Image (cartoon, rainbow, N blue to C red):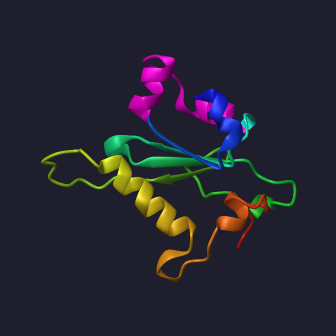
Amino acid sequence: VEEFMGLVDLAKASDADIEFLYGEGTDLSIIAEKWLKLGARLVVITRGAQGAVAYYRPAPETLASCAASPPTQQPNTIDARGRCAPVADTVGAGDTCTGGLLFGLLGGAGALSLAPQLAGGAAWDNA
């Protein structure tokens, strides 16, 4: 997996995927930082009922005021809490999360596209 991190802009994995690859109890933020250093521009880790965390490398032009609001911390994370829902089957949950993530990143529903930041190397800024 690490060999591919230099070839991707967006890496998405679940906490279970990371524990399978690196061992139970692995610190997810350390793996995210590692993957960012290997070349990924954005690392999203889903955590089941605890939601998801997105990690990104701030560009030198990024202002401190653009950092995510608490309770997040370096290496600059954006937390999204999960919502309780009746679960019949989790097949496709990761695909659904990824589809929603890509929809948002590409400017779906009128949002500003983050494609320049994700694939074009532009700074993660206020825009």
Residue at the top extreme, as displayed: 23
Q: Position of residue 47 (x, y in %)?
A: 40, 40
Q: Is residue 35 one of those drawn in magenta?
A: yes
Q: Is residue 29 one of those drawn in magenta?
A: yes
- Please give the name of the residue rendered at 44% of the width and 54% of the height, measured from the top-left corner: 98
- Please give the name of the residue rendered at 39% of the width and 48% of the height, measured from the top-left corner: 51
Residue 5 figure quarter = top right
Q: Position of residue 21 (x, y in %)?
A: 48, 22
- Please give the name of the residue rendered at 12% of the width and 48% of the height, measured from the top-left corner: 88
Q: From which residue to which does the magenta span run? A: 15-36
Residue at the right extreme, as displayed: 60
Residue 63 figure quarter = bottom right
Q: Is residue 124 visible?
A: yes
Q: Is residue 11 left or right of residue 49?
A: right
- Please give the name of the residue rendered at 34% of the width and 42% of the height, measured from the top-left corner: 48
Residue 1 higher or lower than 56, as above or below: above
Q: Is residue 51 left or right of residue 4?
A: left
Q: Is residue 71 left or right of residue 6?
A: left
Residue 75 higher or lower than 31, as above or below: below
The mark total stands at 0
Q: The C terminus appears in which quarter of the rendering?
A: bottom right
Q: Main secondary structure of the magenta part?
A: helix
Residue 34 higher or lower than 100, as above or below: above
Nearest to the observer: residue 39 or residue 87:
39
Q: Is residue 125 left or right of residue 87?
A: right
Q: The N terminus appears in which quarter of the rendering?
A: top right
Nearest to the observer: residue 96 or residue 59:
96
